[in-house]
Amino acid sequence: MISIKNLKAGIEDNLILKGINLEVKAGEVHAIMGPNGSGKSTLACVIAGKEDYQVQEGTIDFEGEDLLELSPEERAHIGVFLSFQYPVEIPGISVSNFIKTSINERRKAKELDPIPAPELLKMMREKMELLNIKKGYLSRNMNEGFSGGEKKRNEIFQMAMLEPKLAILDETDSGLDIDTLRIVANGVNKIKTKDNAIIVITHYQRLLDYIVPDFVHVLHNGRIIKSGSKELAHELEEKGYDWITKEADKKWA
Amino acid sequence: MGLIENIKSFSIIENLSAEKNGLFQSFLANGFPTIKQEDWKYTSLKKIVANDFSVEGNGVTVSEEDIKKYSLGLQHKIVFCGGNLISKPSIDGVSISAFSEFESQNKDAISVLNSSLAKKGFTIKIAKNTVVENPIEILFFTSTKQDNFVQYRNNIDVGENSQIKFVERIQNLSDSKCFVNHFTQINIGKNAKVEYNKIQDNNENAILIDNMNLYQQQDSSVIVNTLIFGGAFTRNNLNFEQNGSNCDSNMNGISILDNNQFADNHTFMDHKQPHCRSNEMYKGIYLGDSKGVFNGKIMVRPDAQKIDAFQSNNNLLLSENATIDSKPQLEIYADDVKCSHGCTIGQLDDDALFYMRSRGIREKEAKAVLTYAFASEAVNNFTIAEVKKLAQKRIAEKLHVDLDFNL
C-alpha cells in the first residue's frame, strides 16, 4: 500500500529523517516506536503532507501514486489519514459540520454529489456507538474545550467516518486514561479490515496490547534502526531503548 | 465644483428657516471633517467631497424586480425610492410615515449638515405594548444619472413594553456615485425590545455615512447588527445612551471587505445609569487592498455603578495589503463596574489549516471555513434567520467558495 524509500526530510537545514525505508501492505498494522526527538511525528507529518517539512531525497509511493507530488487534501482524498498528536481546536465549527465538510470535499474530488443528510446521520450514529460517544458531542465546536481523551476519540471518530486506506495514529495513546485507551483501541480494531492498514506511532507498549502490530520498528535519530515482530515492543518495554540506540549511534557516528 | 459649493447652492433654493440656516452656517464654518480631527484620523473624506455631486437629485423609479432582488423577502416592507416613501406595510400599533422634523443633539459636522437640510426619510411610532412578531424591512433605493448626494433623516419611537425588529438596506441602482448621509434616531421606551440590522451591501459606487443614536429607557434591551459587505466607503457612528437602569445594549458587527473597500465603525456606549449591561462584538475580515477602522468608546458616568460592559474587536487580515486601525477607548468614572475590552489582529492559523487539509478539505475551502468560523461568534448572534443566511452567503461569495456554512 505504501512504500517509503530512502526518505530524507527536515525543516530548513535541519535534517530530521535521514533515510527511512518502510513498506506497509494492506491488512497490516505497523508500530513505530522510539525515544523523544527520533523523528516519529516528522515522519507522520511528511506522509500527510505538512508543508513545513522539506523532502530532500527519497520517494513515497502510495498505491502507485507519488505521494510527495500531492497536496495534503489530495492525499486525504486517496485515503491517507493522520490522527494528530495534538488535534487542533477550531472554534466556530461544529464536529458534525466539520465532518460533513470533509466527507463532501472528498466526494467532490471524486465528482460525487454531497452525502444525503439521512445517510450521514445514520453513519455518524453507528460510528459514535463504536466509540462510545455521547449525542451532544456532534454540536460542540471542533475540539474546543475537549479533554485530551475527547480529542483523541474525536480523531478516531473522524477516521471511522472517512474510512481511510492508511491511517497513521500519532501518539493516540498519549493523555488517555486506561478506560479511554481501551475504547479508542477497540474502535480502531473495529475499523481495521484486510483492505486497510495502520501505522501506530507510540512511546509505549501499552497501546500495542490492544492494537496488536504485525511489525514493530524502532526509529532513532531519523533512521529505522531495528524492525521485528510484536515481541520487540515487549523487549523495549523491559529494557528501554539504550541497548539498540547505542549500537546504532556507533554505526552511524 | 466640490460638494460643499453644490450644497451651498442647494441651501439657497431651499429657503431655510432662521433656525435651520443657523445650523447650516455652523456646518459651513468648518465644513466636512478632515483627518486632523481625532474622530476622522484614519478616515479621509477629502477625495469624496471633491466630487461634483448633485444634491438631492431626482432618480428613476424602482421596479418590482429591484425590490425582489435586494429584499430579504420579509413580509413587512417599507420602500423608499429617491427618498420618497413608495410603499409601507400596515401593522397594528405601528404608524409609518415620511420624514417629519425632530431635534437631535449631535454636534458633529455631518450630523449638523443632516439636521439642517435633510427632508427625506421615515417616521415610525410604535404604540406601547405592541409586539411585532415579523421584522420590518426598510429599503432605500437611489438611482441617478449623475453623481448624487442625498440625506435621509429618520426617527423611531418605540413605546413601553413594545418589541420590534428592523432590517435596513440602502441600495444604489445606478453606476453613478451615490453619497448618502443617513441619520437615524431611536427612542426606546421602558422595557421595550428593539433589534436593528443594517445590511451594508451596496455597489462599488456607494458612499455612506450612517449615524445612529439610540436612547434607552430603563429595562429596555437593544441589539444593533451591522453587516458590511459592499460599498466603496462606509462610516458608521453608532451611539448608545442608557437613560435608565437595567438596560441592555448589544452591538454585533461583521465586515468582510475586498478590493479597495473602506469601512469605519465608530461606536460610543454611554453608560449614564447604574445596573446596566453592554456587549459589543465586531469582527473584521480584510482581503485585497481593503482598509478598516474601528473605534469603540465606552463611557461610564460617575453615577453608573454596577455596569457590566464588554467590547471586542477581532480582525483577520487575509492579504498583504489590507490594513486595520483599531482603537478601543474606555473612560470610567464609577468605581464599582466591570469593564473589559479586547482587540486582536491576526491571520489564519497554519496548524488549523493543515489539520483541515489533512481531512480532505481543500486549501481555499479550509481557509473559507476558518474565516467563517472566525466570524461565526457574531453571525450566531443574528436572530433573524434571513439575515444570518445572507451573511453566510455573502461571506462564501467574497471568499469565492461554494459552501453553505450551515453549521
Image (tube, coloured by chain):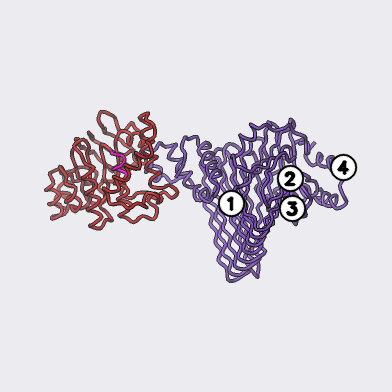
Chain colours: A red, B purple
Q: Earlier in the sequence, mark 1 or mark 4?
A: 4
Query: Quick one: label 3 or label 2, which is nearer the N terminus?
Result: 3
Please give the residue where the numbered disc 4 appears in the rendered image. B12
Name the residue nearer the viewer: B236 or B244: B244
Q: Amino acid at mark 4?
A: Ile
Percent from the top left, x then y, of residue B343?
A: 54, 54
> On screen, A75 above or below A189?
above
Mark 1 or 2, which is nearer the eye? 2
Q: Earlier in the sequence, mark 1 or mark 2?
A: 2
Give the mark toward the camera: 3 or 2. Answer: 2
**Numbered badge on residue B326:** 1
Q: Are marks 4 and 3 on the same chain?
A: yes
Camera-side mark, 4 or 3: 4
Q: Given contact means CB atoms under 8 Å apart, are the residues at marks 4 and 3 in contact?
A: no
What element does badge 3 sit on?
Answer: loop
- Callout 2 environment at 10 Å: few (<14), some (14 to 19), or many (20+)? many
* Chain of the residue under the numbered disc 3 shown in the image: B
**What chain letter is assigned to the residue under label 2?**
B
Q: Where are the magenta residues, as a range?
A: A158-163
**Residue at (46% x, 45% y) in the render:** B348
Q: CA distance from mark 1 to mark 4?
A: 40 Å
Place of residue A96 in the rendered image (x, y in percent of width and height, measured from the top left): 38, 45
Helix, strand or loop status at disc 2: loop
